[in-house]
Amino acid sequence: MKSLSLCWKDGKTGALTTSWDDGGVADRQLVTILNKHGLKGTWNLCSGRLGMEQGHSGWDNLIGAEEVRQLYSGHEVACHSVTHPSLAMMPDSHIFSEVIEDRRRLESLTGYPVKGMALPFGASDQRVMAVLRQCGILYARGVAPKRDFQLPVDFLNWQPTCHFKDQLERTWDEFVRIKFDMPKLFYLWGHSWEFDRDQDWDSIEKFCVIAGTDGEIWHATNYQIYEYITAWYNLITTIEKTVLYNPSSVKLWFRMDGAVNCIEPGQLVQLGT
Ligand SMILES: [Zn+2]
């Protein structure tokens, strides 16, 4: 029987996805830096707070609704609830309205289906996850650093590798050096307003230079990671793995007996014996 394992896009061995919460005005500078170095972000917005200018902290000074489509173009916009409550402390019906209304408003701003979210304060449990499913949410990020590079087991309980202020340099070095049979994933999260607060823009720019020039890394939004892995799990093969069929809309790369191959969406491939 042949050995078959997944590779990331273009046969790459690692992927980096980043996730930024709250929609602070410092997102403008962070988007510019990510764009300059080819990194991708998922930007988690509270639609009920957009345009607020209440204070001097980044948390209270947010981008306007009219900026959303243009600013995050080429990245992904995802939910962070309408008003940022701790969902695990709320009745089911409130969780539902906080998430579905956020989806609806963000979809009208972006013009595409909004499919994921970051949980306010990372608060979730089985009951919250059940409501998220009803809202059509496909993946939800928490705030508990995993410190490993495995693919998520449950996308509604998707924990990041680390926060950008939490030993990022050391963790990235470890990620680059480690060898896996499966593709490895680095999931970075944070808030852009923290760079303003701590006058720390140099550190993220330095990281983006390193990650952006690494040819073994696929830069993807959260949804692209979700879509790619889900397509892989749905790949259909014969028992002997001599015939593969890709029923998804995603081109997949894989390693078979040491060589990297790819399979187009809807393609059936005979691999021989
Ligand atoms: Zn938040």
Image: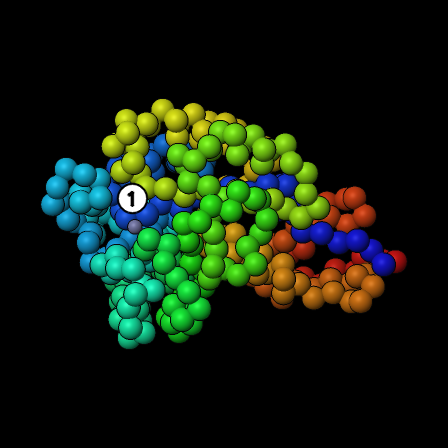
Q: Is residue 60 above or below residue 81?
A: above
Crowd tier of the residue under label 1, counting other residues whose Cα lies within 10 Å: few below 14, some 14–19, many 20 or above: some
Q: Is residue 151 at all visible to an observer of this figure?
A: yes
Residue at 27 percent across and 38 percent down: it is 193
Residue type (three-letter) at the residue carrying disc 1: Leu
- The quadrant the C terminus occupies is bottom right
Q: Is residue 55 above or below residue 68?
A: above
In this rendering, position of residue 23 left or right of residue 242: left
Question: Residue placed farthest to the left in the image?
Answer: 54
**Position of residue 81 in the picture relative to residue 210 (left or right):** left
Q: For this rendering, which residue is in front, 43 or 128?
A: 128
Query: Is residue 272 shown left or right of residue 21?
Result: right
* Residue under the image location 39 percent in, 30 percent down: 204
Q: Is residue 92 left or right of residue 156?
A: left
Instruction: Determine whether the residue tagged by mark 1 lies in a helix, strand or loop.
Output: helix
Q: Indicate the position of residue 54 as horizontal and vertical percent values.
A: 11, 45
Question: Is the CB–ligand 1 distance for label 1 below 8 Å?
Answer: no
List x then y, in percent, for residue 19. Answer: 40, 46
Give the x, y percent position of residue 141.
42, 54
**Residue 196 place in picture, x, y as percent:** 26, 32
Question: Residue beneath label 1, please?
Answer: 71
Name the residue: 52% across, 34% down: 171
Quadrant of the image occupied by residue 130: bottom left
- The answer to which quarter of the image holds residue 78 is bottom left
Q: Quadrant of residue 244?
A: bottom right
Q: Residue at x 18, y 43 (%)?
A: 61
Which residue is nearer to you in this view: 125 or 4? 125
Outermost residue on the right side: it is 273
Between 12 and 95, the residue placed more toward the observer is 95
